[in-house]
């Protein structure tokens, strides 16, 4: 957990207000950013700044929001809930699930971290870009922590009984229009 998250958690505890923490692993929604979509649509490549061998139980912003609402509705306060997807996937396995979801081949090629950071700095400015990139620098420097934080699939948790995270193929199918390229690159879906 990064310094800001620790500070927020400590502030919530000191406030005396009821709270629960919902911590996502890695968001599939990152694949929807324009540069990632272009890589997928035009080049058939997934290129996050993560080594292909790193296992990740990818989740989505919608699943994390659903889990947070379940915790609130059930009054399940005080816990720290890791919100993960149902499968622990390598980069190649992620690409295979995305390929199945959009109906065309996609390959995994981990983007070099320095290149990723340069793009972040150009798009967001050095300050914000540095904070976003720091997570990936941390994971690269601490592979055991990366595995602990990212790899395990979602498991039963008090307050989240009945929560069923979305698998990558289903999530990708739900976002098919975002990856079809229709209207953007003239691509259409193959039957």
Image (cartoon, helix red, strand yellow):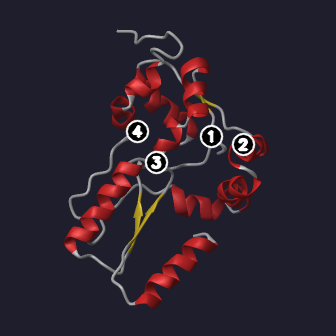
Q: Which residue in the structure is indicated by mark 2?
A: 116
Which numbered disc flags the more N-terminal residue, 2 or 1?
1
When asked about the image quadrant of residue 137, the answer is: bottom right
On the picture, is 109 further left or further right than 7? right
On the picture, is 102 further left or further right than 56? left
What residue is drawn where x is 55% and y is 72%? Answer: 5
* Relative image position of residue 181 (x, y in whole percent): 48, 18
Q: Which residue in the structure is indicated by mark 1?
A: 48
Residue 100, visible in the rendered structure:
no
Instruction: Answer whether labels 4 and 1 touch (C-beta < 8 Å).
Output: no
Q: Which mark is residue 168?
A: 4
Instruction: Answer whether labels 3 and 4 touch (C-beta < 8 Å).
Output: yes
Instruction: Answer whether labels 2 and 3 touch (C-beta < 8 Å).
Output: no
Instruction: Answer whether labels 2 and 1 touch (C-beta < 8 Å).
Output: yes
Q: Which mark is residue 153?
A: none
Which numbered disc flags the more N-terminal residue, 3 or 4?
3
Picture layout, residue 97 above or below residue 86: above
Q: CA distance from mark 2 to mark 3?
A: 19 Å
Q: Which residue in the structure is indicated by mark 3?
A: 58
Viewport quadrant of the C terminus: top left
Instruction: Answer whether labels 2 and 4 touch (C-beta < 8 Å).
Output: no
């Amino acid at each position: 957990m990064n310094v800001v998250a620790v500070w927020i958690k400590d502030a919530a505890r000191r406030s005396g207000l009821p709270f629960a923490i919902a911590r996502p692993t890695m968001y599939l929604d990152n694949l929807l950013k324009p540069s990632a979509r272009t890589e997928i649509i035009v080049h058939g490549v997934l290129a996050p700044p993560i080594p292909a061998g790193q296992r990740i139980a990818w989740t989505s912003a919608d699943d994390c929001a659903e889990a947070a609402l379940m915790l609130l509705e059930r009054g399940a306060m005080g816990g720290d809930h890791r919100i993960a997807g149902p499968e622990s996937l390598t980069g190649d396995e992620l690409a295979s699930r995305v390929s199945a979801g959009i109906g065309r081949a996609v390959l995994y090629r981990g983007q070099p971290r320095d290149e990723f950071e340069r793009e972040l700095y150009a798009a967001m400015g050095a300050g914000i870009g540095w904070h976003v990139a720091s997570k990936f620098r941390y994971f690269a420097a601490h592979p055991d922590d990366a595995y602990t934080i990212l790899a395990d699939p979602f498991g039963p948790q008090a307050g989240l009984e009945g929560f069923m995270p979305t698998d990558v193929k289903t999530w990708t199918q739900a976002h098919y229009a975002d990856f079809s390229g229709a209207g953007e690159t003239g691509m259409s879906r193959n039957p």
